[in-house]
């Protein structure tokens, strides 16, 4: 019986008896350098599992320089799809002397019949395989389930609802009797939130009579969620909207309330501690201490297997709150409603998990006088550096007057960039497309974005120039064959992340989609019919995989650097390599679609 390592997927989807059948049924074969192991068009007779050596996957229909589309090393397997499809689409050729275990076709097919999960592995989309990887990485099932699977309905309390005639006195009595901190006032089809703090301020500060209707102090702009949504999402919404409770709504009516204290009692995690420290910070020193804990939070979330989309949402909300509080400390109130601080790039998209370069700008209301603005913006940049946000090498910061201006000035800049269509102008348009308001008057940003979409979305020539940038970097599938040494690697940002981010950004601009997050843009493009839902979902999973691989490099190197973008393929597990190959194929397919839509050359 052959001693073959079956500790990785898909063999973990077999039981002990199934793995024994594999060990008893495989043979070991030797292949010389440049020997063709399985040729294109040849019927699949074996699943090959590499014990030693390296094997290239080649497309014989392509020119020799571009024919290598995959690379397999020890622990990888290939040939299963050839069996399922009847014949091989590509050529598999030994790059060096190689030893492979051969799993016969008949045994493989019997295993597929006997173990549906095993068979499904080879037919699964990138999305499902990525979920399998996430499950394997989780350090504890209970911890991961607590974060990823807990629903709002498990944690919500029944809402206290009173009618519109209820007095302030009766509202306080109701809260005291129920040991609650908030209630809802019903006004026909509307519901307003009243908290103990609202009632206290109404009586003590505003001097309202205790017999006045409590509805007079109710807040009708509620932050809501559904009972089936993840509890993690409720925390993100609380952080983003600066509230301590979320109203659970079904069919337009409140069925529950989730308060921050409920979430705190349900989970015990550093993420909530950091959120609270940010909210409670009353000075720049306290805010800096809270901000310094975000890398610790990222490590905790990654260790607990939290889905990357949720982690990005929480970190984006936290970073937004940190910047908003810093803005409040630095800027006089008279200027806050006449200005809008925006973040751009990965910060604007909500995809900057660790703090890297600052990308920010300032929009002023037309006619607003702020003589000391330039000096104060230099202070804001220094403050953000102190909070852990490094300066932007390209000087895209509020300390640079080129990134400060009135609404009219911003509109003029956008018109000028759209007309020029040169590389620098297109880069600036891309940066502004990702802009997200973190402090001040949000409406100012929307006025600027209106101009951007109006100028650009129907300009076919500009869109073609804009899309071309997504094809700038080659997909590193063709580089796999040359990764002979551990110190070499592929640039995951250029080869994977950027083509997806910019390509999706281009399609979103074309379709007038206002979302800034790449994942939200993909959802919108699928809903719009511009992308098939399955393709959009797999493209999102590919982006999540690239981002996670890059994040791991950043954490290992304690920050962002050029090396942090390089992923060494030999250091990945078999499943990770498999996922990386599939994800890069998704990128290649996406770039081909972009080239066809915008009439660009791509090979």
Image: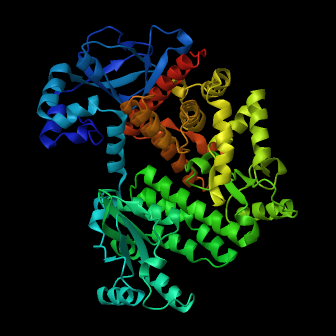
Question: Does residue 35 appear left or right of residue 159 in this picture?
Answer: right
In this orientation, which residue lies closer to the viewer: 9 or 368? 368
Residue depicted at x 67% and y 47%: 447
Residue depicted at x 15% and y 35%: 115
Q: Is residue 175 visible?
A: yes
Q: Residue 224: image x %, image y %?
A: 40, 61
- Rendered view: 173 above or below 270: below
Q: Residue 377: image x %, image y %?
A: 80, 60
Residue depicted at x 37% and y 41%: 130
Question: Does residue 391 appear left or right of residue 351 in this picture?
Answer: right
- Rendered view: 64 above or below 332: above
Q: Is residue 343 visible?
A: no
Question: Does residue 506 appear left or right of residue 70 in this picture?
Answer: right
Which image quarter holds the C terminus? top right
Q: Residue 40: image x %, image y %?
A: 36, 10
Q: Residue 223: image x %, image y %?
A: 44, 63
Question: Does residue 230 appear left or right of residue 406 in this picture?
Answer: left
Which image quarter holds the N terminus? top left
Residue depicted at x 69% and y 74%: 284
- Rendered view: 266 above or below 212: above
In this orientation, which residue lies closer to the viewer: 183 or 544? 183
By what rule are the colours in the image chosen? rainbow
In this orientation, which residue lies closer to the viewer: 521 or 452? 452
Q: Quadrant of residue 232?
A: bottom left
- Rendered view: 84 above or below 150: above
In this orientation, which residue lies closer to the viewer: 49 or 125? 125
**How many labels sit on residues?**
0
Q: Quadrant of residue 324?
A: bottom right
Q: Which residue in the rendered view is the most extreme toward the right?
A: 371
């Amino acid at each position: 019986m052959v001693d073959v390592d079956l500790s990785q997927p898909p063999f973990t989807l077999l039981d002990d008896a199934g793995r024994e059948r594999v060990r008893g049924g495989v043979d070991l074969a030797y292949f010389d350098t440049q020997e063709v192991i399985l040729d294109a068009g040849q019927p699949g007779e074996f699943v090959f599992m590499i014990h030693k050596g390296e094997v290239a996957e080649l497309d014989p229909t392509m020119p020799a320089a571009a024919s290598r589309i995959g690379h397999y090393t020890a622990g990888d397997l290939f040939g299963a799809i050839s069996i399922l499809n009847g014949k091989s689409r590509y050529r598999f050729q030994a790059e060096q002397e190689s030893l492979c275990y051969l799993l016969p076709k008949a045994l493989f097919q019997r295993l597929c019949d006997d173990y549906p999960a095993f068979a499904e592995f080879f037919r699964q989309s990138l999305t499902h395989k990525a979920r399998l990887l996430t499950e394997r990485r989780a350090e504890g099932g209970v911890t991961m389930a607590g974060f990823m699977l807990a629903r709002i309905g498990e944690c919500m309390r029944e809402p206290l609802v009173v009618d519109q005639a209820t007095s302030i006195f009766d509202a306080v009595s109701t809260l005291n009797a129920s040991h609650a901190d908030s209630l809802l006032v019903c006004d026909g089809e509307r519901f307003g939130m009243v908290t103990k703090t609202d009632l206290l301020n109404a009586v003590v500060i505003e001097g309202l009579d205790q017999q006045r209707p409590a509805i007079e102090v109710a807040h009708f702009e509620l932050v809501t969620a559904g009972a089936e949504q993840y509890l993690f999402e409720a925390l993100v919404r609380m952080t983003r909207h600066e509230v301590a409770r979320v109203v659970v709504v079904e069919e337009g009516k409140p069925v529950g309330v989730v308060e921050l204290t409920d979430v705190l009692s349900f989970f015990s995690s550093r993420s909530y501690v950091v959120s609270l420290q940010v909210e409670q910070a009353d000075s720049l020193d306290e805010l800096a201490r809270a901000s310094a804990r975000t890398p610790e939070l990222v490590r905790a979330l990654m260790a607990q297997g939290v889905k990357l989309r949720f982690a990005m949402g929480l970190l984006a909300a936290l970073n937004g709150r940190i910047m908003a509080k810093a803005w409040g400390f630095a800027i006089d109130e008279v200027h806050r409603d006449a200005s809008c601080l925006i973040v751009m790039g990965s910060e604007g998209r909500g995809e900057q998990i660790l703090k890297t370069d600052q990308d920010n700008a300032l929009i002023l209301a037309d006619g607003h006088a702020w003589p000391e603005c330039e000096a104060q913006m230099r202070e804001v940049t220094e403050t953000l550096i102190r909070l852990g946000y490094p300066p932007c090498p390209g000087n895209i910061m509020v300390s640079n007057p080129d990134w400060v201006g009135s609404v009219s000035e911003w509109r003029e800049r956008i018109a000028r960039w759209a007309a020029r269509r040169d590389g620098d102008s297109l880069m600036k348009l891309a940066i502004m497309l990702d802009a997200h308001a973190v402090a001040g008057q949000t409406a100012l940003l929307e006025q600027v974005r209106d101009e951007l979409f109006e100028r650009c979305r129907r300009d076919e020539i500009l869109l073609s120039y804009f899309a071309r940038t997504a094809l700038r970097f080659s997909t590193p599938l063709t580089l796999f064959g040359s990764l002979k040494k551990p110190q070499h690697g592929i640039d995951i940002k250029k080869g994977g992340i950027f083509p997806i981010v910019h390509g999706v950004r281009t399609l979103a601009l074309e379709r007038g989609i206002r979302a800034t997050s790449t994942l939200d843009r993909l959802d919108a493009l699928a809903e719009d019919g511009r992308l098939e839902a399955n393709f959009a979902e797999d493209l999102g999973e590919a982006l999540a995989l690239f981002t996670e691989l890059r994040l791991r490099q950043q954490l290992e190197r304690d920050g962002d650097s050029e090396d942090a973008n390089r992923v060494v393929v030999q250091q990945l597990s078999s499943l990770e390599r498999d996922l990386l190959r599939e994800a890069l194929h998704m990128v290649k397919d996406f770039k081909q679609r972009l080239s066809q839509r915008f009439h660009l050359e791509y090979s």
